[in-house]
Image: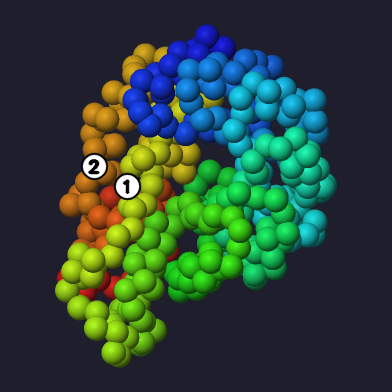
Amino acid sequence: MTTAEGYRLIEDVRSFGDPPPLFVLTGGDPMRRPDLVDIVGHAARIGLTVAMTPSGTAAATRKRLTELRDAGLSRIAVSLDGPDAATHDAFRRVRGSYDWTMRIIQETADLGIPLQINSTVARLTYPHLREMAERVRALPVVLWAVFFLVATGRGAALEQITAEECEDVLHFLYDLTPTVPFGIKTTEAPQYHRVMLQRRSGLTDAGGDGTFVPKPGSGVSTNGPAQQRIRSSRAVTDGNGFVFIDHLGQICPSGFLPAVCGSVRQESLVSIYRHHELFLKLRDPDALEGKCGRCDYRAVCGGSRARAYAATGSPCGSDPLCPYQPRS
């Protein structure tokens, strides 16, 4: 997309209204765009909060980061997938990636730009998760975003963890949250909202089969989360609070759900997001199929639509990374 097309897209994003969406520049590597500072400056001037995810390469120089900060960049997010060079570089398949990433982290901290760490949970990284948490704890981060692998694109060559291992990770993150000074969010694991509800309401998986029941003496009703007076914001999922535009202007529910629904070169992003049939279906809990469609937590979770699409070919299918067995 040209600079002019980028400006038009930014203005379209701003027309969503207030509060304005978070605008994230990703890639590939956005640092490769010569007009990046202008793009960030235009978005910041019209009231968007702008974040960026540079690749761990030499392109993210201190000079470039300084220019971006001065243009109004609100956050840098970098991918760190292992607690040391050996594990990170093995996952990224690029020798030296860890060292470049750590340099960007240091420069970002020195410049006072808020820092986010993105980490992927997959078969290769799962054994190092607890070490990874301690590594992140030692860094000046505001948010740890934990990405659960979706077997699509380059991720199709990687192996996912099991549903039971995913559940263990989510409980680990829940226990970790009150002990660290930064926020923790999950990407493509909206079942974290179910786990939070269950943990807060005294439910336990006593049989280890994904069927949660009240702990003895907890006084919790078995009539489902609506009866437990638990408040938790719904998950942001593919096409539901999130939308992705690729470098050619094509609109998809997310980068992990590559179903093209239009192009910002011909249509309004706001109109596609609000009215396209697929986006409407992704926001309708009653459109979900299989186990997700029967789940009593479907309105706050909904499952990963991208993972369902990758696994079943249907964006409304069941998320195979969730072991929960609905009671209804």
N-term-proximal mark, 2 vs 1 = 2
Position of the N terminus by quadrant: top right
In this rendering, is residue 70 above or below 118? above
| Relative depth, front residue between 43 and 83 | 43
Q: Residue furthest top?
A: 4
Question: Is label 2 in contact with label 1 (beta carbons under 8 Å)?
Answer: yes
The secondary element bearing badge 1 is classed as loop
Q: Where residue 23 sits in the image (x, y, percent)?
A: 49, 30
Camera sees residue 158: no
Residue 307 lies, in percent from the top left, at 41, 53
27 or 315, which is in the foreground?
Answer: 27
Left or right for 323, reference 60: left
Identify residue for label 1. Answer: 315
Q: Nearer the viewer, residue 71 or 317?
A: 71
Q: Is the residue 3 above or below the residue 162 in the image? A: above
- Identify residue for label 2: 281
In percent of width and height, residue 136 lies at: 68, 58
Judge left or right: residue 325 versus residue 66: left
172 left or right of 194?
right
Quadrant of the image occupied by residue 220:
bottom left
**Furthest residue toward bottom:** 216
| Amino acid at pointer 1 | Pro
Residue drawn at point x = 49 percent, y = 68 percent: 174
Q: Where residue 306 appears, x then y in whole percent?
A: 40, 48
Residue 181 image-quadrant placement:
bottom right
Q: Residue at x 47, y 43 (%)?
A: 256
